[in-house]
Amino acid sequence: MAIVSISLSDENLAELDKIQETYGLKGRSDAVRSAINSAISELQDVADLSGNVEGVLITIRRDHADPWMSLIQAKYVNAIKTQLHSHLKDQKCLEVMIISCDAEVLQCIIHEIKASGKSDYVRFVRS
């Protein structure tokens, strides 16, 4: 098994310890492997979508003043049927979008949101 060295903020380390404790894992390495497996499962769920899909895309983004999400929403305006924007504490925003589009379009939307590195949470709930 390979050994990988990573740097984590105090907040990330606390969250990693929380994962370890919650799932009763033996150590931080098991917690990292569990988090990776969870991320892979989420990626696979989106990759497995095909045809027309409908559902709710939920995003929590940092920095209300940054217009990056508005640019993505404008680009995919035909896929977004309804959108709700709500201000949260610490300049964060909640974006809830009702989506109806081809799976490939949804995959592009999610990819662009995640690739920006400016969201704390991205989840698609299929109807």
Image (cartoon, grey):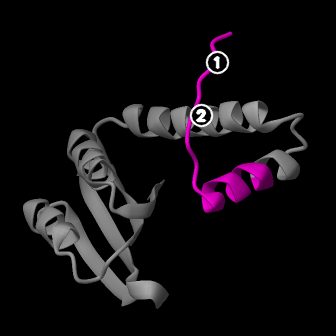
Which image quadrant is residue 103 in? top left
Tell me, yes or no, if residue 88 can be seen here: no
- The residue drawn where x is 26% and y is 76% is 82
Going from N to C along the chain, the mark reached first, 1 or 2, is 1
Q: Is residue 84 magenta?
A: no
Quickly name the residue at label 2.
36
- Hey, what amino acid is under mark 2? Ile
Q: CA distance from mark 1 to mark 2?
A: 15 Å
Q: Nearer the viewer, residue 23 or 90?
A: 90
- Hey, what amino acid is under mark 1? Ile
Quickly name the residue at label 1.
3
* Rendering coords of residue 24 (x, y %): 90, 43
Q: Callout 1: 10 Å neighbours few (<14), some, many (20+)?
A: few
The residue stretch that appears in magenta: 1-18
Q: Nearer the viewer, residue 107 or 81?
A: 107
Task: Indicate left or right for 17 with 26 as reference.
Answer: left
- The residue drawn where x is 28% and y is 38% is 51
* Rendering coords of residue 68 (x, y %): 18, 67
Q: In terms of secondary structure, where does tag 1 sit?
A: loop
Q: Is residue 11 magenta?
A: yes
Task: Indicate left or right for 82 with 125 as reference.
Answer: left
* Rendering coords of residue 46 (x, y %): 41, 40
Q: Nearer the viewer, residue 7 or 106?
A: 7
Q: Is residue 26 above or below residue 67?
A: above
Task: Indicate left or right for 26 with 97 as reference.
Answer: right
